[in-house]
Every structure is written in structure tokens, then in C-alpha cells.
């Protein structure tokens, strides 16, 4: 079905981002295979993305951004990363653009904007968001990283884990407990502080070894009596949980849209392969079983796409609800897993070889059902929205 979401300006942006990926990530300057082996994307790639105008597009022009508060530009980046089978790089850049930036845009005061936004746009200040701790993930309000007020500083102690961009990050939006502990205060006692590279007592742990998304640096962070100036508080003290809940729909739409794009990319690679590969004297795509599989994958992708595009319009109009985004996230990430698995099967043994993009896409896909809120939690949100 013809898509109506994008206009010419988005397609021009897509063409230039595609060129960036081809030159800086896959070919010429880029060495994606090496980054996958190294477990990290070199920091200068973010700077080059910044020079190309592919970071923090929504930031105001006075800070070097394009002032383009239009999530369709963000979606183009996520889609193209999936199409190029560079999901690990895609996660890092979409985390920076889709997930972190809104916190800086919405909750920074003027002085903070001047300190940070320019660097975020240029890719000189790479961002991360640290909510999850070794002991809690889904039950965010149960976090224990503490920030005790001491004069003009907070003193932060605790550990975060599974943090995307954890090694590369210069600015980490860190959820901390500033309020009095105890069950009654679980939500109101949370605040967001920006922890900066180089602060004494802020240590990075291991770059974690994962099933997929290998070029993405996912790390543990630990804080031991880190003195964070009060000027690094985002928004108001005690409102952190509210800020997180307000921004999660955009994060979930970003994940869902990339999931559909990943399934679509898998379909494209598979169509090409089944036309070429022969068995029993015929192209394997000409077996009815293969045709039915790919017909089902295509149908699911196209139907999901319409919902995602509608969600993107709702987000741009400020109308995307938590349950809209939760439905998109669980449905599309399950579709991604199912579709890529079925496509991989049609590659036979070659599908298991990492030199084929389908194999990497399979490994990269598994986590999307877990992060950004596990899919069971998404169903809780949808269920509760019906008063259950
Ligand atoms: C590669 C990767 C990158 C990540 N990036 C980040 C990041 O940048 N920043 C960050 O803060 N976090 C990040 N995360 C953490 C991620 O968001 C959490 O892993 C996720 O929210 C689940 O939390 P958990 O791992 O503690 O699982 P748990 O909360 O322990 O859940 C375990 C299982 O129990 C289920 N469960 C829990 N509660 C319920 C319930 N009420 N009803 C039914 N089932 C339930 C869950 O759905 C899940 O299946 C990342 C994780 C990974 C793997």
C-alpha cells in the first residue's frame, strides 16, 4: 500500500542519510563489521553524523539544530538503519535522538540548554539514559540509586545496568531517588540528574556481551559518592517519575517503528534470496510453502505499518497515548521476531551465518521484546487503560 506519511523533504533527508550510512558506516570510512567485533561504534561517527545534520534535528537553530520538531525525520533514521542491517549503530543514534533529546528539550533551563544542546547536536556530547538497576527493571519506582542533598550538590550512590551508549556517553540522564524512601513515596521521590563524563566517583563497568546488537556499547555504570551540582538537576526535584512516564510513549514508538522496518528489510533480503536459490530444480521461492510464508510476512508488515504511521501522526499532534504506544511496541516487536525467524528459515544454513544480514537481524531482534518496557508490561498498560 502506498505510504502517505512522508513528504518530499523527508525523502530528501532519507537519501542523504542513506549516503551517510553507505559512506561512514558500511563502506569507505566505515567498518561496521569491525565495530560489531569491537562492541562499540567509534565516537567520531557520532560527530560525523552531527556534521551531516542527523543528530537532534528537533533542537532549535540557535543551538545548531534544524528546529524540526517532526518525528518523521527520526523515523527515517531508524528505518534506514534497519534496511542497512546496522541495528547496533541504529540503537545508539535513535537513543540519542528519539529517547534522550526530548528530556533536554523539555526540562532544561536556559543555562542548561546553552551548556549541552550544541554538543548534543554536533555529536560531541553523546547521551544515555539510566533507569534500570541490577535489582529492578520493570518496577522502575523501586529503584534505589540515591541522591542526598549536601549544600549545592547531590551526592549520588548506586549502580545502573544495561545502559545503551553506556561507554560512549558524556551525559547520562540518571534516575535517582531524592525523596524519603518507603512505599508511599515510591513515585514522588524520583528525580533526574545529568551525570557527566569525568565526575569523580562515576565509573563505567564492563561493556556487556550480548546476543546481538554487538556494536552497541551496553554498560554498567556505578556511582560512588559522586558530587553532582544542583545545576545538573533536570526540571523539578521529585518529578522524575512523571517525566519518565511522559516520555516513554515516544521511546516505544521509536522501537516499534524500527521493528516493522527490520521485518520489512528481512522480507526484502529473503525475496531476493528465494528467487536465486534453487532446490529440486526450481527456485525455492516458487514452492507454495515459501510463497505463503512470504505472503503472510508481507501482510503483517503492511498492516503494522499503517498503525505505526498513524501513531507517528498522533505523536506529532501531541496525541499519542501511553496505551497507543504500548500496543505498537508489543505488537510490532513480536511481529519482528516472528517475521525474521520465518525469513531466516528460507535461507537454510546460510541464514545462520553472520555474514548474511538476516542472521544479524535475527540476533539483533530478540531484545526489542525486552527493552523499552518488557512486552508483558506493555500489555499491563493496555489492560489497565480498559479499567481492568
Ligand atoms: C540491550 C539492552 C539495552 C537496554 N538499554 C537500557 C537503557 O539504555 N537504559 C535503561 O535504563 N535500561 C535499559 N535496558 C533495560 C531494559 O529496559 C530492562 O531490561 C527491561 O525494562 C526489563 O527489566 P529487567 O531486565 O529488570 O526484567 P524484570 O523486570 O526482572 O522482568 C523479568 C520478566 O518478568 C516479567 N515481569 C515483570 N513484572 C511483571 C508484571 N507485573 N507482570 C507480568 N510480567 C512481569 C517481565 O516482563 C520479564 O519478562 C536495556 C536492556 C537491554 C537488554
Image: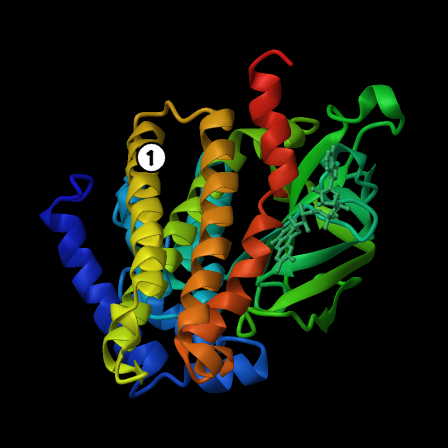
Looking at the rendered structure, the number of numbered marks drawn on it comes to 1
Q: Residue furthest front?
A: 280
**Quadrant of the rendered structure where residue 37 is?**
bottom right
Residue 351 at what x, y percent from top left?
46, 77
- Please tell me which residue lies in front, 6 or 68: 6
Is residue 350 visible in the rendered image? The answer is yes
Q: Residue furthest right?
A: 182
Considering the image in quadrants, where does the N terminus appear?
top left
Indicate left or right for 251 with 142 as reference.
left
Q: Secondary structure at mark 1?
A: helix
Tag 1: Cα neighbours inside 10 Å, few (<14), some, or many (≥20)?
some
Residue at image point 87% right, 24% down: 183
Residue at image point 30% right, 85% down: 27
Residue 233 at what x, y percent from top left?
64, 39
Considering the image in quadrants, where does the C terminus appear?
top right
Residue, disc 1: 307
Indicate left or right for 3 with 111 as reference.
left
Residue at image point 77% right, 28% down: 189
Residue at image point 43% right, 40% down: 253
Indicate left or right for 18 with 219 as reference.
left
**Quadrant of the rendered structure where residue 348 is?**
bottom left
Indicate left or right for 248 with 158 as reference.
left
Is residue 114 visible in the rendered image? The answer is no
Residue 52 at what x, y percent from top left?
26, 66
Residue 23 at what x, y percent from top left?
27, 80
Q: Residue furthest top?
A: 387
**Quadrant of the rendered structure where residue 221 is?**
bottom right
Mark 1 close to ligand 1, CB under 8 Å? no
57 up-or-down from 234: above or below: below
132 up-or-down from 310: above or below: below
Amino acid at each position: 500500500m502506498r505510504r502517505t506519511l512522508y513528504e518530499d523533504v523527508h525523502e530528501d533527508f532519507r537519501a542523504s542519510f542513506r549516503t551517510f550510512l553507505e559512506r561512514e558506516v558500511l563502506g569507505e570510512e566505515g567498518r561496521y563489521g569491525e565495530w560489531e567485533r569491537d562492541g562499540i561504534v567509534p565516537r567520531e561517527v557520532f560527530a560525523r553524523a552531527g556534521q551531516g545534520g542527523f543528530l537532534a534535528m528537533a533542537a532549535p537553530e540557535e543551538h545548531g539544530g534544524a528546529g524540526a520538531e517532526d518525528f518523521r525525520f527520526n523515523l527515517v533514521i531508524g528505518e534506514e538503519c534497519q534496511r542497512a542491517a546496522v541495528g547496533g549503530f541504529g540503537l545508539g543514534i535513535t537513543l540519542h535522538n528519539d529517547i534522550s533529546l526530548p528530556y533536554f528539550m523539555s526540562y532544561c533551563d536556559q543555562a542548561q540548554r546553552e551548556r549541552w544542546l550544541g554538543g548534543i547536536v554536533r555529536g560531541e556530547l553523546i547521551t544515555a539514559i539510566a533507569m534500570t538497576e541490577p535489582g529492578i527493571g520493570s518496577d522502575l519506582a523501586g529503584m534505589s540509586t540515591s541522591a542526598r542533598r549536601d549544600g549545592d550538590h547531590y551526592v549520588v550512590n548506586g549502580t545502573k545496568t544495561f545502559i545503551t551508549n553506556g561507554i560512549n556517553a558524556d551525559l547520562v540522564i540518571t534516575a535517582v531517588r531524592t525523596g524519603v524512601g518507603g512505599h508511599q513515596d515510591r513515585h514522588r521521590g524520583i528525580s533526574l540528574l545529568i551525570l557527566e563524563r569525568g565526575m569523580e566517583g562515576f565509573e563505567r563497568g564492563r561493556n556487556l556481551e550480548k546476543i546481538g546488537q554487538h556494536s552497541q556499547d551496553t554498560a554498567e555504570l556505578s556511582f560512588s559518592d559522586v558530587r553532582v551540582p544542583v545545576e545538573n538537576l533536570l526540571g523539578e526535584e521529585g518529578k522524575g517519575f512523571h517525566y519518565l512516564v511522559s516520555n516513554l510513549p515516544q521511546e516505544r514508538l521509536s522501537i516499534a517503528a524500527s521493528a516493522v522496518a527490520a521485518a520489512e528489510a528481512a522480507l526484502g533480503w529473503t525475496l531476493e534470496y528465494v528467487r536465486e536459490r534453487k532446490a529440486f530444480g526450481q527456485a525455492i521461492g516458487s514452492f507454495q510453502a515459501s510463497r505463503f510464508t512470504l505472503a503472510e510476512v508481507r501482510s503483517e508488515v503492511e498492516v503494522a505499518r499503517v498503525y505505526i504511521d498513524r501513531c507517528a501522526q498522533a505523536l506529532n499532534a501531541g496525541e499519542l497515548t501511553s496505551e497507543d504506544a504500548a500496543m505498537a511496541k508489543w505488537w510490532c516487536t513480536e511481529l519482528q521476531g516472528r517475521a525474521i525467524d520465518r525469513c531466516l528459515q528460507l535461507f537454510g544454513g546460510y541464514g545462520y551465518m553472520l555474514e548474511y544480514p538476516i542472521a544479524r537481524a535475527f540476533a539483533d531482534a530478540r531484545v526489542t521484546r525486552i527493552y523499552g518496557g518488557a512486552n508483558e508490561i506493555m500489555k499491563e498498560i493496555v489492560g489497565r487503560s480498559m479499567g481492568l
